[in-house]
Amino acid sequence: MVDESVYWSPHDILSRNAMYNFVCGARGVGKTFAAKRIVINNFLKNRKQFIYLRRYRSEVASAAKNFFNDIAEYYPQARFRYNNGVFECATDAKAEHWETMGYPVSLSKSQQLKSVAYPDVTWIIFDEFIIGKGHIRYLPNETNVFNDFYLTVDRYLDKTRVLFISNSVSIMCPYITAYDLQPNGQRFMRRHNGFIACEYVDSTRFTEVVNKSKFGRFIEKTDYSRYAVKNEFLDNGDTLLGRKPEHAYYVFTVVAPTGKYSVWRGHEGDTARMWVQKKRPGNEAYVTFTPALVSDDVPLIPSGSDLLSIFRTSFSRGDMRFSTATVRNDFVKELGYS
């Protein structure tokens, strides 16, 4: 029997009293299970409800039906079911009195819920908030969509906390970008005056247990093991990363859906000819590759323009450097490579 102490415990991050709690950890380390325990215990003790959130309706439909399968046995005093679109619980001996304890919701349809009241909801579990490359897409302006949904639930009452949980699939995630949550070697991060906390789960002991299994030994030296077991982002390497030299000169700032990126040029003999970073100079000139972001001060660089071709050529030749892996991944996406 596996020692339960190898699995993730929410105690440390929740002790930071943040409203938005981001947790990235190895697959199977117990993130979703622990989150379920939090909301079930909260209902049984305080009769407070929860929302189980996924991005799309198809995800919610399959997950909701099986929500209690792995955890019901830990609560012999209660009965649970998914019934008529809600999660229910009965604690009477004959299971005749069923109470609503939670709501499965898809973020893509959350705009339809603005008039719905959730006065007793004090927890939201956003499961698998990071998606992998080649899978379903993030919603347009997703961080704003989520914040709008959060306001629908919380109503400025500071009553509702959120657990964002995911495997370390990809740092090309709008939440990581928007809230500056790029992994930096620290287990915990605190952002926005403590409204946000983030934990990159220490998977050392879990990895040791996994590597004793036959499947663990089979995948041990693979990229799959790096993200699924060792909690490493596969797209967080140091390829094409570098700090711009002091003599590099500013060209312009690219305005993109993920933020603003200053572009700098170097000289002959430099390790690269172009640098891209989030830090920007005082006086800026703006351009964009995105038609929706065009304004009086932000002209469009068309998709077939010579300038965009220069960017792509510079990247393809390895002549471009980026300040961080997130900047690299987001900017390369703007160039149309992902």
Image: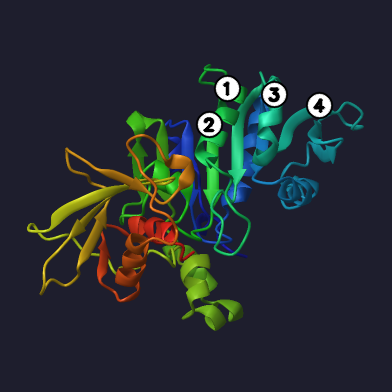
Q: CA distance from mark 3 to mark 1?
A: 17 Å
Q: Nearer the viewer, residue 172 or 51?
A: 172
Mark 1 vs mark 2: in front? 2
Secondary structure type for disc 1? helix
Residue 99: which disc? 4
Residue 270 lies in quadrant: bottom left
Q: Where does label 3 land, which residue?
A: 47
Please tell me which of labels 4 and 3 falls first in the chain: 3
In this view, the mark in front (4 or 1): 1
Residue position for label 2: 147
Instruction: Measure how far apart labels 1 and 2 are at the Cα level.
Output: 10 Å
Question: Would you say the residues marked 4 and 3 are in contact, meaning their CB atoms lie under 8 Å apart?
Answer: yes
Q: Amino acid at mark 3?
A: Arg
What residue do we see at 25% from left, 65% from top? Answer: 321
Given the image, on which type of amino acid does mark 1 rest?
Answer: Asp
270 lies left or right of 57: left
Can you identify the residue that label 1 sits on? Answer: 154
Q: Earlier in the sequence, mark 2 or mark 3?
A: 3
Three-letter code for the amino acid on which mark 4 is drawn:
Glu
Which label sits in the foreground, 2 or 3?
2
Earlier along the polypeptide chain: callout 2 or callout 4? 4
Q: Label 4 vs label 1: CA separation?
A: 21 Å
